[in-house]
Amino acid sequence: MPVPRRYTTEAIVLSRFDYAEADRILTLMTPAGGKIKAIAKGIRRPTSRIGGSVEPFAELRLALAHGRTFDVVTQVEVLHPWLRMRDDLVSFGTASYLAELADGTLEERHASEAVYLLLKRAYEILDAGMAPGRVARWFEMHLADELGIRPEVDRCVECGRMLVADERYRWVPPLGGVLCERCPGPPHDRVGLSLEGLKLLKAYQRMDVEAIAALRIRPEVEREVERAMREFLAFSLDRSPRSLAFLDEIRRGEAEAPAPARPLVPA
Ligand SMILES: [Zn+2]
């Protein structure tokens, strides 16, 4: 079947950069075509009909024409701008981290509808105000699943024994998950994992994202699982997303921000 010259698709903008005098190159995630690069010509001119509508992390419906190097955007309709997600720096930083993860792990023009739907769902719930850290962990876990690198959290990665509640576990990303207390494992890369941390990792694999939003979790455990997933992805994907540094910086800034002034003596 000949490739149609023009087509329409839904797309999430993963990133964009300026090109030539007034153009932009977009990296798009699409349900049927996977990751594609497209050019929006003249978009930076004030007279452009589509300027302003092609924001990163928005869902669009695009009309495109096949081009030699890049497909050419001919029409844009904004389906979901997800504006509230952009109001908060941590939530915006998280959106850019998820886009970078998707961008870095998908090959161009490989259909990946599952990852598209995952990213779309993550942006919907970020926009609805769910804690960005939980959205990020949920996305990381399910992306790992889609990429075929789901971490093992039920059985020991070495001996295959079901993990039980009263033993000491170690989180060993190079082995793909949790190591039981009986197995020696490699000499380094040993990080203890608490029972609560293990339970939370299981929850991210099994529970619906809305149920995860309702969980009461101690901040230390959230941080433990964040570190665990970060190490796991850094090892499994062999990359450290640049947006993580940005996100860390924002969160440090928020933690150090002076608390609002209060009277010394409670009234
Ligand atoms: Zn074992």
Image (cartoon, rainbow, N blue to C red):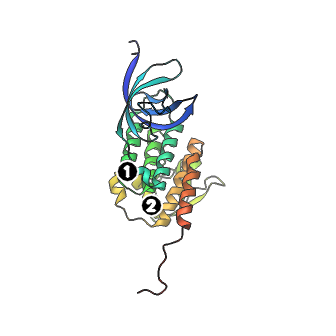
Above or below, 102 relative to 89: above
Q: Nearer the viewer, residue 250 or 186?
A: 250
Q: Is residue 112 above or below residue 140?
A: above
Quarter of the image for the N terminus: give it.
top left
Report whether residue 179 is seen: no
Q: Residue at x 47, y 23 (%)?
A: 71
Q: Position of residue 122 (x, y in %)?
A: 40, 47
Identity of the residue furthest to the front in this view: 47
Relative height, residue 78 to residue 190 (above, below): above
* Drawn side of residue 127 relative to residue 40, left or right: left
Dot 2: few (<14), some (14–19), or many (≥20) neighbours within 10 Å? few
* Residue 251 visible: yes
Residue sitting at x 56%, y 50%: 244
Q: Position of residue 26 (x, y in %)?
A: 50, 32
Name which quarter of the figure residue 252 lies in.
bottom right
- The residue closer to the viewer here, 86 or 32, is 86
Residue 155, position as x, y percentages in the image: 47, 52
Front position among marks 1 and 2 = 1
Q: Which mark is residue 155?
A: none
Label 1's element?
Answer: helix
| Sequence-first disc among 1 and 2 | 1
The residue singled out by tag 2 in the image is 164
Q: Image point 38% across, 46% down: which residue?
A: 82
Q: Position of residue 35 (x, y in %)?
A: 47, 31
- Reading the image, the residue beneath label 1 is 127
Amino acid type, mark 2: Val
Q: Quadrant of the C terminus?
A: bottom left
The amino acid sitting under disc 1 is Asp
